[in-house]
Image: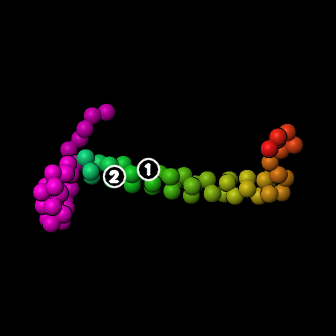
Amino acid sequence: MGRVKVNLTLDAEVAETARALGLNMSRLAEQAIAEATKAERNRLWREETREANAAYAEELAREGLPLARFRTF
């Protein structure tokens, strides 16, 4: 997809320390945003499927696992 330029505002001391340590702030920011995006996407999915998951859990509690009689462990 390529790369896109964005503007970020950082605490001056944080940026200065990162530069002094030779850290690639763009890559670090990208990784942190990717992780936050994944976490938020997962949170939204859990929220959207909460009712269906609860209903399925109730069904399992009531009726047990499908095909459980064929389990060998």
Q: Is residue 46 left or right of residue 11?
A: right
Q: Which residue is located at x 80 percent, y 44 percent?
A: 73
Closer to us: 73 or 34: 73
Task: State the extent of the magenta-drawn residues as a range.
Answer: 1-26
Q: Which residue is located at x 33 percent, y 52 percent?
A: 33
Mark 2 neighbour class, 10 Å CA radius: few under 14, some 14 to 19, many 20 or more: few
Farthest residue toward the right? 69
Mark 1 neighbour class, 10 Å CA radius: few under 14, some 14 to 19, many 20 or more: few
Q: Is residue 14 left or right of residue 73?
A: left
* C-alpha separation, residue under disc 2 versus residue under disc 1: 9 Å
Q: Return the x and y of residue 42 as percentages of the image width and height.
A: 50, 52
**Is tag 2's residue or tag 1's residue first in the polypeptide sequence?**
2
Q: Which residue is mark 1?
A: 38
Kind of residue at disc 2 = Ile
Placement of the N terminus among the 4 image quadrants: top left
Kind of residue at disc 1 = Lys
Is any part of residue 29 visible from this angle? yes
Q: Which residue is mark 2?
A: 33
